[in-house]
Amino acid sequence: MKDEDKLTLLELASMAGSFYWLEMWLFRSIGALAQEVDLPALNVHLDAQSRQHAWHAILWEEQIPNIAGKVRYDFTQAPNQQVERVLRLLEQRDLDHVRESASNGMDMIHDDLEQKDLFLAQMLPHSEKITPSESVAGVYRVIIPRLIVSYNILNQRISDVSSASTRRVLRLVLSDELAGWQEGEILIEQVLSKETKETALTMTQFQGLLESSLMDLIGLLGS
């Protein structure tokens, strides 16, 4: 990679802060889902992964460099509006409430989203709620794969000389994410094997809705 493609200190702070925010979201969301799923093996897996994501967040917080005129928490925010919107959808349970907000021209999820961005109203007509299984599948088949892509992009752009500690964190976190993703996928397939074809189709369509909302991004942070 050319020198001009390497990260500046400000870009590194922004990416590390975004990764902290994402890992904290995964910690909270996966921890909540661990209490809702009805497959014991998946429950145990999600609980362990939630705690691991909390640890990853701590690691990323430590990687935010000190920059004059800035405080660390200036950088700990969602990477972009698209990702924030999708993650809020994954936390949503009552779709009737979402449809009512959309039909009134109101977005109860993000105040400055325009009406044309109210993709939440596009949910399947017969669905009343996003089930825990759909949320878990969305996390493991959309969010975590894209997070891994973003980690790999950072790995390509950091300098070996100035960011040795960040590269060590990346190696550790990527190893954890890949192992957790593979184990989670096996468990999701076990869940799907017990569902009807209609339920499996609904889950696939839901994943497609999530992906369509992120389709112009590479990973979660962009190119």
Image (tube, helix red, strand yellow):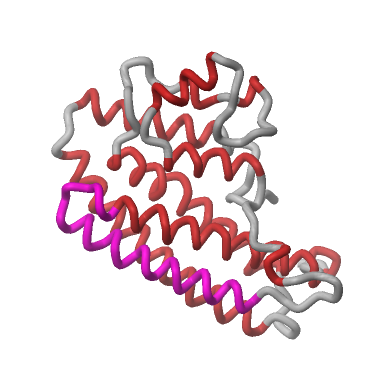
Percent coordinates x, y for residue 162 in the rendering: 75, 83
Q: Look at the picture and state if 117 lies above or below 62.
A: above
* Residue 13 position by quadrant: bottom right
With 57 as the anchor, is 50 left or right in this view?
left
Percent coordinates x, y for residue 33 in the rendering: 31, 50
Q: Look at the picture and state if 128 lies above or below 43.
A: above
Of residue 84 and residue 162, the one placed in the foreground of this image is 84
Tell me the residue at 54%/25% (across/down).
119
Q: Look at the picture and state if 71 lies above or below 164.
A: above
Q: Look at the picture and state if 93 lies above or below 68.
A: above
Of residue 184 and residue 119, the one placed in the foreground of this image is 119
* Residue 12 position by quadrant: bottom right
Percent coordinates x, y for residue 36 in the rendering: 25, 48
With 151 as the anchor, is 178 left or right in this view?
left
With 174 as the anchor, is 153 left or right in this view?
right
Q: How many labels does the image show?
A: 0
* Residue 152 position by quadrant: bottom right
Residue stretch rendered in magenta on the structure: 34-63
**Residue 129 lies in magenta, yes or no?**
no
Tell me the residue at 24%/28% (across/down).
199
**Residue 39 lies in magenta, yes or no?**
yes
Tell me the residue at 20%/43% (across/down).
191
Tell me the chief SS of the magenta region: helix
Of residue 195 and residue 56, the one placed in the foreground of this image is 56
Tell me the residue at 45%/74% (across/down).
55
Image quadrant where one finds the N terminus: bottom right
